[in-house]
Amino acid sequence: MGSKNKLKRFNQNLTFPNVIQPSREELIENKFPLKGNWRKDFFKNENPIVLELGCGKGEYSVYLAKENLDKNFIGIDLKGARLWAGAKESLILELTNVAFIRAQIELVSDLFSENEIDEIWITFPDPQIKHKRTKHRLTNPQFLAKYKNILKPEGFIHLKTDSEYMHGYTLGLLQGMGIEVEYAHHDLYTNPYAPKEASAVQTYYEKIYLEENKPITYLKFKFP
């Protein structure tokens, strides 16, 4: 994507009512007004909130919002030019139950209050294979602690990835921490018993991986 296109998308994001771009200072200084108030002040309803972390072009959030009008959806990504696609499509579809946040996922507990989120999707995160990068891995213990804080009790987390390494790392970590794994499979599309919610929509990158015959892994778990 050219720099002119990126700039155009960044500028359009500023005008989109479904895109929120808080500053880092606003978040870490606890001055973000929507924290704890998403239902009341943004969605204007009391429906469950489903979060997609690293949402990219927002395919999951937009699809799930279309199929579940009784739920609210929020996609988070730092790449504003990617996030623009989902925001634009949801405006065209006149979906009022989906929003997008441009922010770092490490600040997720500054975006939401305790027990404010009902469900979390992590779709195709960077596996951060190098040891020195483990602090950025979205299922490391530090990130899991943040998710537990904002999730309601019994709230599920879904991990969908093309990385066998990420799948195995997370599965081993969960079992070691005594976290309940509801479902796990290393090749989602070869399993006829896979949950429909995991295969109902494919992201831009997922389609590329499938064309390359890369297996897609899936995990569904919740905290005890």
Image (cartoon, grey):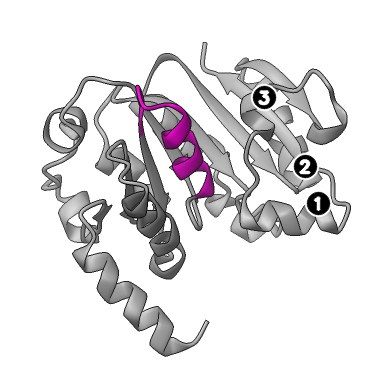
Query: Compared with residue 201, is residue 207 higher up or lower down, i.e. above or below?
Result: below
Residue tagged 1 = 210
Q: Secondary structure at mark 2?
A: loop
Q: Nearer the viewer, residue 87 or 31?
A: 87
Residue tagged 2 = 216
Mark earlier in primary sequence (3, 2): 3
What amino acid is found at the position of numbered circle 2 in the picture?
A: Ile
Q: Looking at the image, can residue 134 be seen?
A: yes
Residue found 62% across the figure and 40% down from its top: 201
What amino acid is found at the position of numbered circle 3 in the picture?
A: Lys
Residue 80, horizontal then vertical, whole percent: 38, 66
Q: Nearer the viewer, residue 161 or 82?
A: 82
Category of crowding for the residue at label 1, using alpha-carbon neighbours closer than 10 angstroms: few (below 14), some (14–19), many (at least 20): some
Name the dominant secondary structure of the magenta segment: helix
Contact (Cβ within 8 Å) of mark 2 with mark 1:
yes
Residue found 19% across the figure and 24% down from its top: 45
Contact (Cβ within 8 Å) of mark 3 with mark 2:
no
Category of crowding for the residue at label 2, using alpha-carbon neighbours closer than 10 angstroms: few (below 14), some (14–19), many (at least 20): many
Q: Secondary structure at mark 1?
A: helix
Residue 96, horizontal then vertical, whole percent: 27, 39
Residue tagged 3 = 196
Mark earlier in primary sequence (2, 1): 1
What amino acid is found at the position of numbered circle 1 in the picture?
A: Leu
Residue found 51% across the figure and 57% down from its top: 56
Q: Secondary structure at mark 3?
A: helix
